[in-house]
Structures are given as structure tokens and as C-alpha cells.
Image: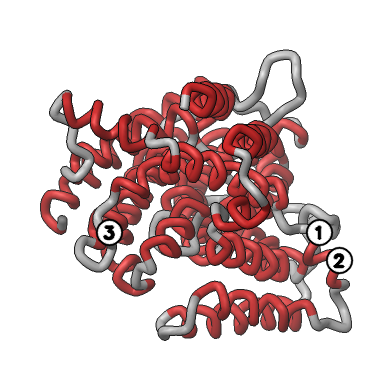
Amino acid sequence: MSAILIVFVLSYIGLALGSIPGYKLDRSGIALLGGLAMMVTLQWDSHQLAKALDFPTLFLLYGLMIISAQFRLGGFYTWVATKTLGLMDRPRLFLFFMMLASALLSALLANDIVCLAFTPVLCRALSQSKIPPVPCLIGLALSSNLGSAMTIVGNPQNMLLGQSGQLDFLGFFLWCTPPALAGLFLAWAWLAPSLPKTLPVTVIEDLSPSPLWPKLNLWQSTKAVLSMLLLLSLFLTDIPREHSTLAIAGFLLISRTIHSKELVGLVDWHLLSLFCGLFWIQAAIVEAGILQSGMAILASFGLDVQNLFILNTVSVILSNLVSNVPAVMLLIPSLPIASENPIAWYSLAVSSTLAGNLILIGSIANLIVVEQAKNLGISISFYDHAKVGIPTTVLTILIFFIWLGVAG
């Protein structure tokens, strides 16, 4: 047990830091290394190794990445982003519709992909205007996280909760959307005063197609939209979500225009590796009784995670220490049976997602925006994000706790 505890602690310290000093290991590598160390320590055979993986969640993630790649390669993301540019003479209105578009797309598709597609287009357009770019780009990161809280397929931690608890898609949406929308409006209201009300009309030069912002292909984008609408309708049935998603993804691979290797090439294998490593770590600490002991220690201090306010406070803290996906994986075994208390599962999804907006390193979406903006000549510092992220997240979480008290 001591060896497992050491591996667990070292793995989560690495996940919290995001890297190991002196080594080129990121969070995915650290999680995978920790999982493999658990495998060796516990002497798992291939059957036990496979049993520890939650294949329905992995399949759902994989299929949604293929569908999201279709949107990107069809130029749909670029088209949506460029449509908002017509409002750049009214910067505050532009910010509102840009954040709304980002949130809605993130609710249906991976928020990381939305940021990856929107950021270069915005950076190019903002560099040609007199609008301060930093508030707009921070708004993109915040809104993509907030929008992703609304649905089971909005982000990886929601997918994990939805699959593990077999949560109802519509029930999840109806409960999680109000606090997410309130947070979206609050984030916009906080950022809007940093922008001028009006500016002279800005004429944006035509954006030359590139791998970062491919030109709109009407048929391929229509194909993506229709596929997503079909998938959403299937989510409302009793068909397992991973089956529906893989079926739609398989259909999209059949194309005369987009090569299948282009779609598969946009799958985030690093994220899938992160999930595999975390599944193995989680299975190991449950088998060794470490997780149960940790919950017992919390209970001895009067911190019972069966209380939803305590559960979600722990979720917010853990999500900012080790990131939201590892935090959710740690807390899932302590949740009540989903059919008896689905609110506990819904609330954990919202709190872990909202927590990602607090500081720059709290969400992968934040880092994608910052790194891409840096490559395109726009610098966003930790402080730039924190002076918006901290107050808006604190207020958003307070609104969430009020909602939890009313609707919980």
C-alpha cells in the first residue's frame, strides 16, 4: 500500500505542476507514467489492465473528436468566428456575440477544439482593429469553459460523469444550464467596460485559408451540422451514447473530399492517454483502499462529501490543484447512486468546470488561447487572466451555490 500511495502522491503533484522540472513530461505523460507504475506495483495482467479502463467514456471522447474535426476541416468554426467580425465597430456587442457563439459551440463540441479554431481568426482580426485584444481573448477562454458546463458532451469531465452515472442528457442540460448562462453574462459584464462602446468601422482583410482557419466548405459543414443534430436526437433515446457517437463518426469518415487521416489526425491522443493513465491510477487507489481512507479522514473533520456544498467546495479546490478531470475521477467513487441522486452528479460537473476559469492553468482551453495568441504576437499574462478569472469565477461559483440551494 505504501508504494501505491507514493506513486499516487507523486503523480498528483506532477499533475498539479503540469510538468516535472528537468524532464519533458506534460500532464498526459505524467498520468500515463503513474498508471503504468501502478500496473507494475500491483502486478496487473492484461485483463485487469483493460478492466480498469472505462471504455464507454473513451469511445465517446474519440467519436466526438472525429465529429469536431469535421466541423473544423469543413471551415464551420472559421465561418462562425468571421461572422461576428461584422460587429467590430461596436466592440461590446462584438464581445457578447463572440462569447455566446463560443459557449454554444462548446456545449455541443469539445471546448478545447472551439478555442483552437477561434483563437487564430480572432487574433488576426483584432490585430487589424483598434479593439484591445486581451479582453476579447480572455472572454473566449472563459465563455468556452462556461458553455461546456451545460451538456454532457461539453468537456471531458462531463463526459466521464455522464457515462459513469448514465445520466439523462436532457435532465443534465436543464439543471446545468442556468448557472452556466448566469456565469456567461457575468463574465461578459465584467469584461465589457474594458472595451470602447463604438469604434470607426473596421474593414478586415480577407483571411487566407490555412490549416488554422480553413475556408468554409458548405457541403462539409452542412454534413457536420446535420450529423450533430442527428446525434443529439439519438442522445435523447435509450441507445448507449458511445454507440451513437461512434456510428456518426464512422459515417463522417466516408468522404470524397476530406481524407480519413485528416479527421483521425485531429483526434487528441494526448487527452485519451491522460484518461487511460488516470483510470489506472484511480483503480489502483480504490483497490488499495487509499481513496476510502482519504474520505474517512475528511469525515473525521466533519467534511462529509455526501453534503453537496462540501462536495462542490472540495471539487473547486481540487480542480485548481490538479485540474478538473483528475479531480472528478477522484470524487466519482464517493458519489451516491446516480439514479437516486442525480443532482450530486450534475453539481459536480458544473463546479469542476466553473473552477477551471479561476486561474490560467485551471483549464486546457485557457492555455490553448494563451499559447496560440502568443504565437500570433499577442501576449496574455497570468495576471491578465487572473484579474478577470478570479473575481468572475468567485461570483459565478457563489451564484452556483445559490442555485444548488434552490434546485438541489
The relative height of residue 377 versus residue 55 in the rendered view (above or below) is above
Are the residues flagged by discs 3 and 2 in contact, CB closer than 8 Å?
A: no
What residue sits 86% from the left and 66% below the top?
A: 261
Disc sitting over residue 178 in the figure: 3
Q: How far apart are marks 3 and 2 (CA)?
A: 39 Å
Q: Which quadrant holds residue 42?
A: top right
What residue sits 70% from the left and 67% below the top?
A: 66
Are the residues flagged by discs 2 and 1 in contact, CB closer than 8 Å?
A: yes
Residue under pointer 2: 261
Residue under pointer 1: 265
| Residue 205 picture location, percent across and down | 78, 53
| Callout 3 crowding tier (Cα within 10 Å): few <14, some 14–19, many ≥20 | some
Q: Which amino acid, mark 3?
A: Pro
The relative height of residue 106 versus residue 321 in the rendered view (above or below) is below
Q: Which residue is nearer to you in this view: 257 or 241?
A: 241
Are the residues flagged by discs 3 and 1 in contact, CB closer than 8 Å?
A: no
In the image: residue 313, left or right of residue 51: left
Q: Which of marks 3 and 1 is nearer the N terminus?
A: 3
Disc sitting over residue 7 in the figure: none
Q: Which quadrant holds residue 399?
A: top left
The relative height of residue 88 versus residue 10 in the rendered view (above or below) is below
| Residue 128 picture location, percent across and down | 72, 42
| Residue 391 picture location, percent across and down | 33, 30
Q: Is mark 1 on a helix, strand or loop?
A: helix
In the image: residue 405, left or right of residue 351: left
In the image: residue 229, left or right of residue 300: right
| Residue 195 picture location, percent across and down | 48, 37
Q: Which amino acid, mark 1?
A: Gly
The relative height of residue 363 versus residue 78 in the rendered view (above or below) is above
